[in-house]
Image (spheres, rainbow, N blue to C red):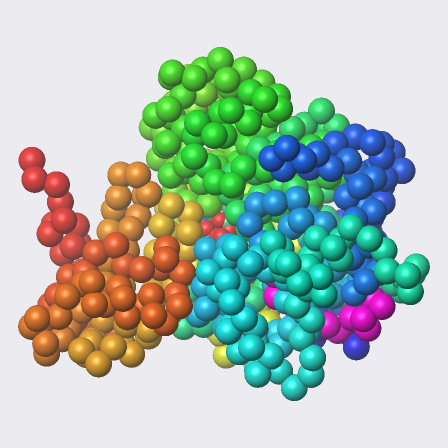
Amino acid sequence: MNVDFQRWPVDLAQRYRKHGYWIDRPLTRILEQQQQLQPSAPAVICGERTFSYERLNQLSTNLAARLASRGLGPGDTALVQLPNVAEFYIVFFALLKAGVAPVNALYSHRRHEMTAYAKQIRPTLLIASRQHELFANDDFIKDLRDMRDGPLAVLLLEEEAPGSSLSLWIQTKPDDAVADFGPTDPGEVAFFQLSGGSTGTPKLIPRTHNDYDYSVRASAEICELTPETRFLCALPAAHNFPLSSPGALGVFHAGGCMVLAPNPEPLACFALIRKHGVTMAGLVPSAVNLWLQAAPDHRSALASLKLLQVGGAHFPQSHARMVPEILGCKLQQVFGMAEGLVNYTRLDDPDELVFTTQGRPISPDDEIKIVDENGQPVPDGETGRLATRGPYTFRGYYRSPDHNAEVFDDEGFYYSGDLVCRSNGDYLSVVGRVKDQINRGGEKIAAEEVESLLLLHPDVREVALVAIQDPMLGEKSCAVIVSENSCIKPLALRRHLMSLGVAEYKLPDRFSFADAIPLTAFGKPDKKKLRADLAQKFAPAL
Ligand code: J2J
């Protein structure tokens, strides 16, 4: 039994195979290939530890064998939450080998998000870290167990009990090792990506081996990765950008090496770049701002850096132009989404295109529609809503028929909620968005999710979460609150959200109290007006 998901129509699937995008091999082929080509080459550098391809392959096989001997396999799902450590990739490949489909939660996620994922996938396996507040004791593990009918296997990093020590499970093969995990069907779900979201509950994106592998191979080629590539991963390793655009999987495909950083803090990253001769990195715009500020005093540390990819949020042109000058490397803009479609500026594009657009799609078979509010195509150069379908763009969120009906049209095009403008052939510029989301330095916040949590507070009668501009993060969030209690304090509302176990980046940066939420002619909260009002309210005094 496999994980259920919305498949591509047969004619499109045939086309994607015929054009050589879907090669019908599981994602584990990436490691197997390097195991044969260059087993002793370094694959991952994590602190003082270096893992060769052979070791990465062996350790992931050890874990997969143990999972298989416990009866875990295709149809099972796992909830995984690990920081940026080598074990993240060992676990990822182990689960692919065993055929268990994981949700790789972000380390910043807390009880609220983890519960929402668990409710959707009903995991048979949990892999997490004792150092995360949620797993400092066994309360949440007990909650997860209560949620299930069957058993839940638990493996923890930094765990003392041998039975649930991830490190022990990875290091040795069990005596009753299962040598062959059975074939993985590449047309099936390999794992779930996380959606940035715009609804009340975090949504999951089923990604198949075939579709993801194509995006990885094509991305590695576009970014010209080679065995000499040394890629600094300073964004959360599970995120789609550092995992696949071309990210870790692209680097492994090309036989290069991943250098892990816990976060994008510039001085620590610069030290890693110098120490390991890093050639390439991927960042969100807010992190680039920090690097641009710190770089002038540390230019020599960056000598090996050839390419900086920037994506995930709006990157102002003025900042884009500074990258080559201040960081001394080439810039590549990336506009992608965990749902699929990824656009890149190409390495041989003229500078103007690189500074002023977010690139063009990976594939000749990425179909793009840019339409007005009535669904009519807009001429090139004009702004419209982005809709797309293609060989690595999903066809539906996991078990979310109502939401899918809203974001897909009859032809299977996915409406990403972005406002874009096409120019210079098929280059796209991201101009804005229609989805109800705040992009806080690349971290996406679904307004509705935070609003529903705030409404659980007895003093909150109405609420609207909106974006306010921020010089460092691009956007921050502001909660506009209507309350009968004139003494209500932001601190109490923040505490309320913390007690509900929501990730910290979703806590409103500001609160604003109002008598009423303005409404549009349709009676919906007028967020455009709220944003304009708040821009005035929080405008820096001249
Ligand atoms: C403006 N907005 C952007 C950009 C994404 C590569 C790169 C990024 C992501 C990602 C990814 C943007 N300029 N350059 O998955 O593989 C906003 C858009 C988009 C949403 C997707 C990848 N690049 N965005 O950011 O799933 O609004 O993926 O729809 O987290 O981020 O967010 P996410």
The reply to whether residue 256 is visible in this rendering is yes
Q: Nearer the viewer, residue 483 or 149?
A: 149
Image coords of residue 181 (percent x, y): 87, 63
Q: Quadrant of the N terminus?
A: bottom right
Instruction: Pinpoint residue 293: horizontal percent, then vertical percent.
Output: 34, 25
Residue 441: horizontal and vertical position, in percent?
38, 45
Q: Residue at x 26, y 64 (%)?
A: 494
225 in magenta:
no
The C terminus sits in image quarter: top left
In front: 194, or 147? 147
Q: Is residue 369 visible?
A: no
In the image, residue 448 sits, relative to residue 277, either above or below, namely below
Please say if 170 is above or below 335.
below
Residue 71 in magenta stretch: yes
Give the residue displayed 75% in from the left and 73% down from the top: 75
Vertical arrangement, residue 391 with respect to residue 404, above or below: above
Q: Would residue 132 appear left or right of 187 to someone viewing this image?
A: left
Relative to 377, 412 lies left or right: right
Q: Which residues are magenta?
A: 68-80
